[in-house]
Image (spheres, rainbow, N blue to C red):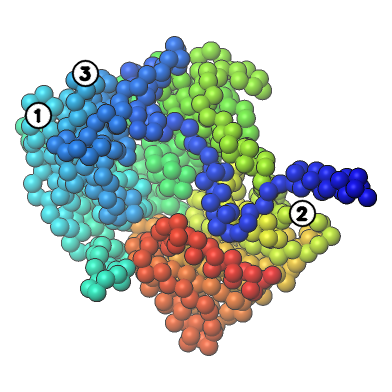
């Protein structure tokens, strides 16, 4: 009996020791997100000395690494410094090098003001004298001049310049004030055109081009977090659909003379989303969009006279893209500094490709072609006449790096590991840092050499060094129950192929019936399904507790061509909801899905389309988790909405038909509606108006309002837990 007992104990120990560790509770799963994310490799990478070295933040230090010699040195250690004039240890959030690598500008003490910007204090460090000095307090942006001799910054809606040689500040603009900004954007420009710094140094460091924005006629939105005895109301000029467009104009100020010249661009109440310095002295390129954003003009301006010349015009039946916020691609135009040519990513042949133009606007050649899309130009090597770019040529769910000659010949693939690759190129194009992951592999970071030759499918060919292997994340994944996404696809009833991802639950048994959660975003030019590693702790917890989780690349999204992307124009909601319902119906053909236990979840645009889907297809889903939704696009900002819906005066019925409020009477499922009253992006009024419509229709929903926070609703680890606990309990109560 004694020996039998020992054998039983040993057998049990063997089984449990080989079993993967499961999360003890939701908090444990949420905490695991950081572990699974692991390290993203070297932080704040700045290439220095022409691209022969790169610097990066390592703890409190800045280190540099030479790819050629593979040597590393510490350049700066915050522990060795205090804030000037104090005994407080110095710390910083980001840094920037001068072009000659003699100075570092540090950004410290960041205080958020809007979603993407705020106030910071900037400090200057000399690599020669090892001294640290305060440059400016309470500035939104600051940047070293290309020659490394001056620093410009914007504070209090005006531009200033600090001369490092004479250590003296000079004010460059003086008319900035409340609602009239020099060198910074209005809220809606920052939100919808994706940039924070509204000014730019010329290549020769003699001039600064900048936006002046007038918000005086834009309606002001107010909100508060309801903390304290007296409410602290924040005010933001926020133009909704149909409201006046904030006028902007582009000025160029000479930093020596102080002379300011306004660029004479034909302006028709539209937008100027981008400016670029060209390779020609005293010439600035200005991108202008009409209000509907379907007519783009490219102007070249003489900065001495302000006179402008139309170089190119591009029209669209829907909208014209100049960047993609969702993929963090801020520029589709590239103007090389030393060549009188420019490059533009556009979908003239239905797919986003690189086009090459001369300075008269004449097309030299289309550089890339095919039924796939260029995501971003990473570097242009004019000496070797090569372009390095990221594309979806391998698959719409993958980002891979390629090189190609300027004339469109000699295309060569440079990355071969499946997944989504993010690449940081040295200015001389000799080296790049490659950060990637795929479904089964947490983030990997590698340093590569473009010159030594890369052999297809030969692992490590051309690789200099592994910078991050994330062994801890891999070990955690392997020791814990990890539910990996599976990529699949199906064809809708109208013949459209859609890519989907599926996460199956713990101890999956195809003979069982499981509830399904369809997790959606769905907005124009966005994408949910990639071949990349997922570290989302909430999703992992749901899988552990018995849910199937599905995502889909719906119509309107990126990477599948213009026809796929632009079909949603003027009728947001129609095709996205159709594709979500088709996805749910397809999943219900799988033996393991319980068709009576379907849920849909989304945040922001995902919140909007989740509500819209269950109200226009009321018999499909049992539960809807709707967070921070737009519920009537007449309540949202004009730049985003009019880009995709057109003017309300021309498409009123489209706005009405695209609103969940219109269909509130159709509600049949259980709905949890969540929003922060401090959301400066999608105002809580959207949720309140939908709630009013439900009440008027005699429908009941569960409403959660979070007074503090922002568009994310959750604003701290504690609030995130509270939010996701509410989701989890709601699914448990009404779906399981």
Residue 735, x across and y down, in percent: 67, 71
Secondary structure category for the residue under label 1? loop
Q: Which residue is mark 2?
A: 507
Q: Which residue is mark 3?
A: 128
Mark 3, other Cα within 10 Å: few <14 / some 14–19 / many ≥20: few
Answer whether residue 735 is visible to the viewer in this image: yes
Q: Which residue is mark 1?
A: 167
Residue 458, x across and y down, in percent: 66, 20
Give the residue drawn at x 62%, y 71%. 623
Observer-nearest of 150 and 638: 150
Quadrant including the C terminus: bottom right
Horizontal arrangement in the rendering, residue 310 relative to residue 658 (left or right): left
Q: Quadrant of residue 634?
A: bottom left
C-alpha separation, residue under disc 1 versus residue under disc 2: 67 Å
In the image, residue 231 sits, relative to residue 368, either above or below, namely below
Mark 1, other Cα within 10 Å: few <14 / some 14–19 / many ≥20: few
Secondary structure category for the residue under label 2? loop
Give the residue drawn at x 52%, y 46%. 34
Observer-nearest of 532 and 694: 532
Mark 2, other Cα within 10 Å: few <14 / some 14–19 / many ≥20: few
Sequence-wise first label, 3 or 2 = 3
């Amino acid at each position: 009996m004694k020996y039998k007992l020992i054998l039983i104990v040993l057998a049990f120990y063997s089984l449990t020791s080989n079993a993967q560790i499961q999360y003890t509770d939701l908090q444990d799963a949420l905490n695991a997100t950081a572990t699974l994310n692991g390290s993203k490799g070297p932080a704040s990478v700045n290439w220095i000395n022409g691209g022969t070295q790169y610097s990066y933040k390592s703890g409190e230090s800045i280190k540099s690494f030479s790819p050629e010699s593979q040597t590393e040195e510490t350049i700066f250690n915050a522990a060795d410094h205090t804030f000037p004039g104090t005994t407080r240890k110095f710390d910083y959030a980001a840094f920037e090098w001068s072009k000659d690598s003699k100075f570092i500008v540090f950004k410290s003490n960041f205080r958020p003001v809007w979603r993407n910007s705020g106030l910071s204090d900037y400090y200057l460090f000399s690599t020669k004298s090892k001294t640290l000095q305060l440059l400016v307090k309470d500035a939104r942006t600051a940047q070293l001049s290309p020659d490394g001799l001056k620093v410009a910054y914007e504070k209090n809606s005006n531009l200033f310049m600090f001369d490092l040689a004479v250590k003296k500040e000079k004010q460059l603009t003086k008319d900035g004030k409340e609602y009239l900004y020099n060198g910074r954007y209005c809220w809606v420009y920052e939100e919808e055109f994706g940039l924070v710094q509204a000014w730019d140094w010329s290549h020769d460091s003699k001039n600064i081009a900048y936006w002046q924005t007038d918000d005086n006629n834009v309606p002001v939105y107010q909100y508060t977090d309801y903390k304290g005895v007296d409410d602290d109301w924040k005010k933001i000029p926020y133009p909704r659909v149909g409201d006046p467009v904030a006028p902007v104009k582009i000025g160029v100020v000479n930093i020596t003379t102080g002379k300011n010249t306004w660029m004479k661009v034909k302006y028709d109440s539209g937008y100027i989303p981008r400016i670029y310095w060209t390779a020609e002295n005293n010439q600035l390129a200005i991108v202008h969009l009409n209000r509907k954003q379907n007519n783009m003009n490219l102007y070249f301006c003489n900065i001495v006279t302000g006179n402008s010349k139309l170089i190119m015009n591009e029209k669209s039946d829907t909208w014209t893209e100049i960047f993609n916020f969702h993929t963090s691609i801020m520029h589709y135009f590239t103007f090389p500094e030393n060549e009188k040519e420019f490059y533009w990513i556009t979908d003239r042949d239905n797919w986003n490709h690189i086009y090459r133009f001369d300075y008269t606007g004449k097309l030299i050649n289309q550089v890339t072609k095919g039924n796939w899309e260029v995501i971003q130009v990473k570097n242009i090597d004019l000496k070797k006449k090569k372009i390095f770019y990221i594309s979806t040529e391998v698959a719409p769910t993958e980002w891979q790096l390629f090189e190609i000659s300027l004339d469109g010949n000699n295309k060569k693939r440079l990355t071969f590991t499946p997944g989504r690759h993010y690449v940081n190129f040295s200015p001389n194009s000799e080296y790049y840092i490659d950060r990637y992951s795929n479904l089964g592999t947490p983030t990997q970071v590698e340093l590569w050499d473009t010159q030594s030759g890369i052999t297809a499918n030969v692992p490590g060919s051309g690789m200099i060094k592994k910078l991050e292997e994330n062994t801890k994340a891999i070990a955690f994944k392997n020791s814990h129950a990890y539910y990996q996404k599976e990529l699949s696809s199906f064809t809708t009833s109208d013949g459209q192929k859609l890519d989907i991802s599926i996460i199956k639950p713990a101890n999956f048994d195809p003979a069982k019936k499981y509830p399904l959660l369809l997790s959606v975003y769905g907005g124009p030019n966005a994408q949910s399904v990639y071949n990349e590693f997922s570290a989302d702790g909430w999703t992992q917890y749901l899988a552990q507790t018995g849910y199937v989780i599905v995502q889909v690349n719906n119509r309107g999204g990126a990477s599948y061509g213009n026809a796929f992307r632009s079909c949603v124009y003027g009728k947001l909601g129609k095709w996205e909801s159709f594709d979500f319902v088709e996805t749910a119906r397809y999943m219900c053909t799988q033996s393991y899905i319980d068709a009576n236990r379907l849920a849909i979840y989304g945040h922001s645009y995902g919140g909007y389309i989740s509500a819209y889907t269950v109200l226009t297809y009321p018999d499909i889903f049992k539960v809807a988790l709707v967070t921070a939704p737009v519920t009537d696009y007449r309540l949202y900002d004009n730049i985003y909405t009019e880009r995709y819906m057109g003017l309300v005066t021309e498409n009123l019925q489209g706005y009405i038909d695209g609103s969940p409020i219109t269909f509130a009477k159709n509600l049949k499922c259980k709905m949890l509606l969540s929003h922060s009253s401090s959301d400066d992006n999608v105002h809580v009024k959207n949720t309140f108006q939908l709630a009013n419509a439900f009440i008027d229709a005699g429908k009941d929903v569960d409403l959660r309002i979070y007074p503090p926070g922002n568009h994310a609703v959750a604003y701290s680890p504690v609030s995130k837990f509270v939010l996701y606990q509410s989701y989890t309990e709601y699914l448990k109560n009404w779906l399981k």
